[in-house]
Amino acid sequence: MTDTEATTRAAGSAVERDRTVAVVGAGTMGQGIAQVALVAGHPVRLYDAAPGRAAQAAEAVVGRLDRLVAKGKLAQEERDAAAARLTPAGSLAELAGAALVVEAIVESLPVKQELFAALEETVDEGCLLATNTSSLSVTAIAGALRLPGRFVGMHFFNPAPLLPLVEVVSGFATDITSATRAYETARAWGKTPVACADTPGFLVNRIARPFYAEAFAVHEEQAADPATIDAVLRESGGFRMGAFELTDLIGHDVNEAVTRSVWEAFFQDPRFRPSLAQRRLVEAGMLGRKTGRGWYTYDDGGAHHPEPHTAEAAPPPEHLVVEGDLEPHGELLEMIRESGIPLREEDEDKGTRLVLPTGGQLVAADGQTSVEFRDVVYFDLALDYRTATRVALAAGPDTSPETLGQAVGLFQALGKKVSVIADVPGMIVARTVARLIDLAHEAVAKGVATEEDVDTAMRLGVNYPLGPIEWSRRLGRNWAYDILDEIHQRDPSGRCAPSLALFRHSYADDKPETGR
């Protein structure tokens, strides 16, 4: 049993509801955590080093409770009881009786270490100490403590009262009983906790990096513009937002800093390499919505996005030949049959592809490029080809206009908008999903978290339509490894190199019966 599995299964109990929870840091996140603990029934003390800030924050929290009452989400008597349990603290000494202290201050290792050293001299030895850090090492923060075993990460997502996920992070010296107590407390507060080891970025910020990185890479390679890439990620990949609009919302200073932090923490592993294009936005002060301009422009009227590239109407092919079963994209065959386009099936071992009337081929994104072949069009991965409203195609300089036109017409006949992008290995959705799967399997193999917790974290933390492990099961054991291996052969920088963990997963059942 791994430490993370033991954390979720070990006997333990949540912090009792009549015990005080202290929150240090009265900013947006601190106020949110205080509200969560209050609504769960705890007495809460809110402290901030800035004079008067805690009292102002307490008033803001009560204001939020009032809005919940107005919306019918909280009874008036519950609001009154919660407000009575909230106390602004004027000094750390007033936190002495707390059973749990959650820190939500500036992301500075020395500042956090100094705070917890002071707290250790204030609270009793049974008090659980937790940091809400999203980017610093839990182990490093606890490194100077006398009792590091009671120190744990409790990473809430903003806004804390609304988002259900809490990453419960065990540092190198964290006791399992402490991690379990934090885990059960988060669950008692109505949250969905996931247990993970102390690794750069924890779960969500570690595994999510390719969602941004691959979109930026496709853009930097001049394969497609931001609006088209975002549209494909949403309408084909099933993601709630595209990478460009999401980073505009987060703020490029914040998003790029997290990417850079993870990259540096992994000793500049090329798989986590930051984007030069995003760095230029930060340098230019174009930070997204909050400055009025990022990848897109914003004003009081809202966002101004260019229209994604959408191909003009084209006639469908008169007939098709399918070679192979087209798995894991076999759903397309059913859709083609239903469309009425004549389809002849050949079982010969010629690969998995559709042959158009021109003789050109339509092939699922596999990490190779059209320029390597004669008259080939690639189509991108979709979460669900039936419900997808857009599909991306890629063609090389040797692809005939007639073949590309017939490929466009085919998907339009299936009810899809079509975006034609440049010839880039792995296209958009396929390369993104393959890299998410890779980092997820690596995290599991290295004992960072269980498969279930990885998928839960990515669905709840960043609203992915599927957890990457579940996506891997749907697409097949070898799918992600094969695509990344092909991309790596064409771009040997190491950015898309598949991990050893993914290799082992992919070929676990692919062995000779005996010997070599």
Image (cartoon, rainbow, N blue to C red):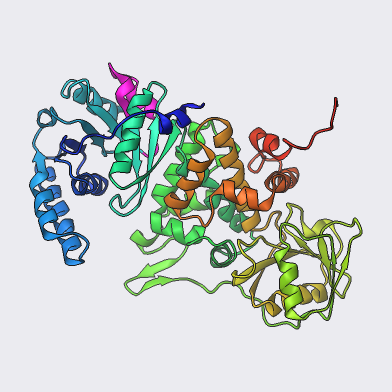
> How far across and down, in percent of the image, does residue 184 sit?
33, 37
Q: Give the magenta part as a residue range.
A: 134-152
Report the front residue among 220 and 21: 21
Residue drawn at point x = 73 percent, y = 82 percent: 314
Question: From this viewpoint, which residue is outermost toward the front?
Answer: 11
- Taking the magenta stretch, the answer to whether it contains residue 136 is yes
Looking at the image, residue 445 sits to the left or right of residue 250; the answer is right
> How far across and down, in percent of the image, does residue 127 sit?
22, 26
**Quarter that holds the C terminus:** top right
Looking at the image, residue 464 sits to the left or right of residue 476; the answer is left
Residue 136 visible in the current orientation: no
Q: Quadrant of residue 229?
A: bottom right
The number of callouts visible is 0
Q: Quadrant of residue 406?
A: bottom right
Q: Quadrant of residue 249?
A: bottom left
Residue drawn at point x = 36 percent, y = 64 percent: 292
Looking at the image, residue 371 sits to the left or right of residue 147; the answer is right
> How far across and down, in percent of the image, does residue 515 sit?
85, 25
> How far across and down, in percent of the image, does residue 57 sit?
15, 48
Residue drawn at point x = 42 percent, y = 59 percent: 248
Question: From this viewpoint, which residue is outermost toward the top?
Answer: 146
Looking at the image, residue 187 sits to the left or right of residue 372; the answer is left
Report the front residue among 116 and 310: 116
- Taking the magenta stretch, the answer to whether it contains residue 420 is no
Residue 294 visible in the current orientation: yes
Report the front residue among 312 and 96: 96
